[in-house]
Amino acid sequence: LIDESGGAVKSCVDDLAVFGGNPLFAGPKPIGQLDAPDVGDYLATLKEAYDARHLTNDGPILLKLEQKLRRLHGTRHCIALANAGLGLTMLMQVFAKGRRGEVIMPAFSYRGLPHFCQWAGQTPRFCDVDRRTHFLDVRAVEAAVSAVTTSILAVCNFNNPGDIEGVCAVGRRHGVPVFLDSVYAAGATHGGRMLGSFAHAEVFSLHATKLLNGFEGGYITTDDDDLDRLLRWQRNFALPGSRPPVAGAESVLGLNAKLNEFHAALATLSVDRLDGIIARNRARYEAYCRGLARIPALSLIPYAEGERANYQMAVVEIRAGWPLSRDETVALLRAEGAAISAYYSPPLHRSEHCPAGVATPALPVAEELARNFVQLPVGELTTVADVDAICGLLAFVAENGAGAAKRYAGRGQP
Amino acid sequence: LIDESGGAVKSCVDDLAVFGGNPLFAGPKPIGQLDAPDVGDYLATLKEAYDARHLTNDGPILLKLEQKLRRLHGTRHCIALANAGLGLTMLMQVFAKGRRGEVIMPAFSYRGLPHFCQWAGQTPRFCDVDRRTHFLDVRAVEAAVSAVTTSILAVCNFNNPGDIEGVCAVGRRHGVPVFLDSVYAAGATHGGRMLGSFAHAEVFSLHATKLLNGFEGGYITTDDDDLDRLLRWQRNFALPGSRPPVAGAESVLGLNAKLNEFHAALATLSVDRLDGIIARNRARYEAYCRGLARIPALSLIPYAEGERANYQMAVVEIRAGWPLSRDETVALLRAEGAAISAYYSPPLHRSEHCPAGVATPALPVAEELARNFVQLPVGELTTVADVDAICGLLAFVAENGAGAAKRYAGRGQP
């Protein structure tokens, strides 16, 4: 069934797994990076930590990891955390300085953001995004910012922090801190400068599905000495007695957000492997470029030219002429063994995570984007040959779409 | 300097490390359990998980751990979590059902509780405790409960859940859920029944310093099917699309509170070692009983008779006749290499973690208890010989206290 030359992989519509054919892949092809350093190296590092019984609270491996990440991002500070979601939540809480207010965020983004915002005692204020960069629309931010805005959360998609300079200028004018969710931007540059030191702070992930793998984990980069002290204190319960002499400390809520040596050990090895990880991602991404070039109705989201990119994601936009709906396309690919999903759908202001009482007007760009994207398999468990096979499958759908659409219509929506 | 027979370990006040003498211990003697299963066993389990690349999201080791803990506690459900603090926070958030209200909690307890409560959008309402059990005073709870009470957090100290039946009865009368912070009560019984299934839910810790060691981690036990479903959903971002058909789901805030296989693997080994851990704790505790019996001004907090206890903590109350203040005593022991601290001091309503605007009247029992307790070294890094040496040191202080107090007075308070 699989044509290893990358040509057509199905000969008729009945061959599609969604209609009962054999799936293209025996095991699931994921959308996460899943980098795996040598287990021997990892277990050796771990044994050292275990024997030393210094497994958390600024252990030696954690300090080394933070140093490596400071160097990678070119920042003065790096605060390693138990996960990136806690990092976003902590920043919203710190920036609010004890007030209940609003955090401005893009409506086209990760579905967890509205809840993180509410944990921090804040209400999300959703803004539309730029059609090309998917980044916060600066005019929308300018229109949304008000006396109750406690911070502005911008999200860096496809390594592209859009008009971050424009958003930061709005923040400065109104005295509101701006921070970046950069969990998909590790290892990438903007204007030739490594992501990490834009805005007041940036948040990265060390989850197994992200570029750098600590299994779980995350970190915040910042050049702000006071913010660094507040966050280090906050991640360790904001213990009374160790309160840093920094303005705003009195309203910081502490929690256990520490990253321990087990995660730091793996992440450290992963940082050392960064160039190789990106090179492998690039090979897969270029295979998608080649394979999708012959399908005009699918448009692969590009990375900025002239910048260093991490090539981690492969997301296509469905355009006029594609025979299936987005959800039909997702169901078709999942049936073939591609463990994929729609991308940032629904938009946050239309999602179940939108808090009751938050009335958001139509956000046309976010709503359009949220209808039209499909993630494709990437990461270490997806080979270039797999990519070729997926492209062959999509080419088959493009050519035999009428038949597939008819079959879908005959059995109801997926 | 150290008298291995357990007799006097210092011959004059100048021998005390706090006044320049050599310390009793070369390395720090901690107050945490620090159980360490065989590293070979651990790394073997880990390699399996690593090779399977199923490291989080209900991995096989996690499911096994949850099963073992259900059996241990005799509960229908166990929800493993990234840490116990998140577990307490999650319960306060779920029980509040979207309201901003008050959580009743003891003023004599762990200093992190007021912040956890605020993360959950709630304000702490501090109550006084019972002089003997250190557990919430039922009359104080009855007086504090009101229309804005969203839950009652009781804390189980020294394996003793005090009058939990009385507190639950108050909760039932007012329709308010009651839950237990049982992080120090793993493996102990109350009325012959294992802690874990009292109240609506109980929270336990898997931190390295606690009885069962997952390095980091925690878990919630409950017999409530609906609560189990809500918490499992909540710990994985409360993802839309997987919302359980349970009342109250619409107000649950999701987060990443998952425990991954690395922590679950260690915790599983630690559960298997429980009987041995408790036996070693008991030997140390009994050595403290023997050694402190000759010092009437120090009273070791007892475990309930006729119950199974975990003997994890050794805390003394300073009584009339002890020559030094509590803080002088702590400083003296720390100088000797005992990595100890005061116990639950200051009380929460007098601490920096008490939110601005919370006015709490005098809580005489909590205030008295918070002045008079000192934790002593316990856990796997403290031998019975160490315990004998500490008791010898304390006996020396009891006999030579006048001189020590004079030296303290001469140089100001520690």
Image (spheres, coloured by chain):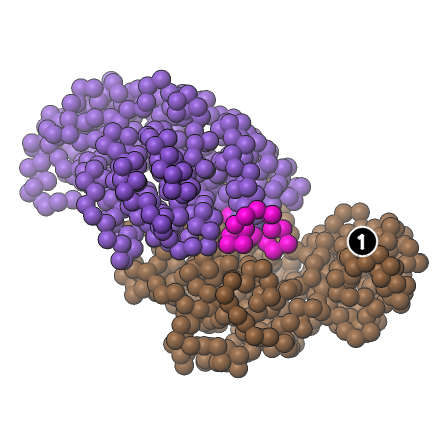
Chain colours: A purple, B brown
Determine whether the residue tagged by mark 1 lies in a helix, strand or loop.
Answer: loop
Answer whether residue A245 is magenta in the image: yes
* Residue at image point 39% right, 59% down: B231
Residue B326 in which image quadrant: bottom right
Answer whether residue A57 is magenta in the image: no
* Residue at image point 49% right, 25% down: A273
* Residue at image point 51% right, 62% down: B355
Does residue B100 sit above or below A94 in this rendering? below
* Residue at image point 67% right, 71% down: B369
- Mark 1 — on which chain does it sit? B
Q: What is the span of residues highlighted in magenta in the rendered image?
A: A237-258
Structural crowding at the residue carrying mark 1, measured as other residues with C-alpha within 10 Å and reported as few (<14), some (14–19) or many (≥20): many
The image shows residue B302 at horizontal and vertical percentages of 69, 72
The image shows residue A382 at horizontal and vertical percentages of 34, 28
Provide the major secondary structure of the magenta segment. loop
The residue tagged 1 is B336
Q: Nearer the viewer, residue A287 or A249?
A: A249
Q: Nearer the viewer, residue A43 or A55?
A: A55
